[in-house]
């Protein structure tokens, strides 16, 4: 299974883990890394992620995120198809530019899911026709790996 993690998933590991929802998302992301290490999933990245991670002002945090990010199996490059699809997504919704590029890149590589901790993005994505399922990492683990029905 191909999985695309947006930038907030990589950043989530640095958030306040005393909050229950944040802790659950951190655990889910760590489980995703474990599944990847076992060869059970493929993690996809993109030039959009490269750019967004590069904008993180805290250099120590950026370096640690890049260490996690560089385990990706594939990097989707910007191209006319991704640009066009990103523009279509933006025209159909209030989805921000980076997020529309993440979705377009996930679709370009035929990822089954794009994971995000941005609930606003998940809600907006559910309202338009996409070729990738946009969901929270916790829901992904529950649905696909714990036999749940999120």
Image (cartoon, grey):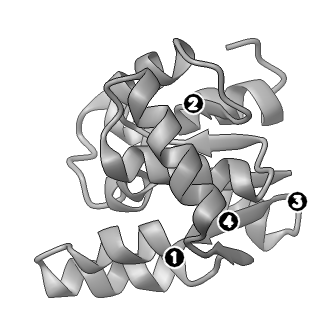
- Are discs 1 and 3 less than 8 Å apart at CB? no
The numbered disc on residue 44 is 4
Residue 49, by quadrant, is: bottom left
Q: Earlier in the sequence, mark 1 or mark 3?
A: 3
Q: CA distance from mark 2 to mark 1?
A: 19 Å
Front tag of 4 and 3? 4
Q: Is residue 99 above or below residue 75?
A: above
* Vertical comparison of 64 with 130: above or below: below
Q: Could you tell me residue 64's position as x and y percent?
A: 35, 82
Q: Which residue is mark 3?
A: 40
Quadrant for residue 108, please give it. bottom right
Q: Nearer the viewer, mark 4 or mark 1?
A: 4
User: In the displayed structure, does residue 41 sit left or right of residue 84?
Assistant: right
Give me the residue at 88% from left, 69% from top. Answer: 39
Is 8 rendered above or below residue 24? below
Indicate which disc, 3 or 2, sits on the residue closer to the N terminus: 3
Report the mark closest to the observer, 3 or 2: 2
Q: Work out how far the residue at label 4 is from the one at label 3, CA to CA, in angstroms.
A: 13 Å
Instruction: Give above or below for 70 relative to 17.
Output: below
Between 137 and 21, which is closer to the camera in this rendering? 137
Residue depicted at x 57% and y 30%: 135
Q: Quadrant of the C terminus?
A: top right
Callouts 3 and 2 close, C-beta under 8 Å: no
Disc with the residue nearer the chain's start (4 vs 1):
4
Side of 39 relative to 76 (left or right): right
For marks 4 and 2, give the CA distance: 15 Å
Q: Nearer the viewer, mark 1 or mark 3?
A: 1
Is the residue under label 1 in contact with that under label 4 (CB below 8 Å)? no
Q: Give the Cα separation between the discs numbered 3 and 2.
A: 19 Å
Question: Mark 1 — residue?
Answer: 69
């Amino acid at each position: 299974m191909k999985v695309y993690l947006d930038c907030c998933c990589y950043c989530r590991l640095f958030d306040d883990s005393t909050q229950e929802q944040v802790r659950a998302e951190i655990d889910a992301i760590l489980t995703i890394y474990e599944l990847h290490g076992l060869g059970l999933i493929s993690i996809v990245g993109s030039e959009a992620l490269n750019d967004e991670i590069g904008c993180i002002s805290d250099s120590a945090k950026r370096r640690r995120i890049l260490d996690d990010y560089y385990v990706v199996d594939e990097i989707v490059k910007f191209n006319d198809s991704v640009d066009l699809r990103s523009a279509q997504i933006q025209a159909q919704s209030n989805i921000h530019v980076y997020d529309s590029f993440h979705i377009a890149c996930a679709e370009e590589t035929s990822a089954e899911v794009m994971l995000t901790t941005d609930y606003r993005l998940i809600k907006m994505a559910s309202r338009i026709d996409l070729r990738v399922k946009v969901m929270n990492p916790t829901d992904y683990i529950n649905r696909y790996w714990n036999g749940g029905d999120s």
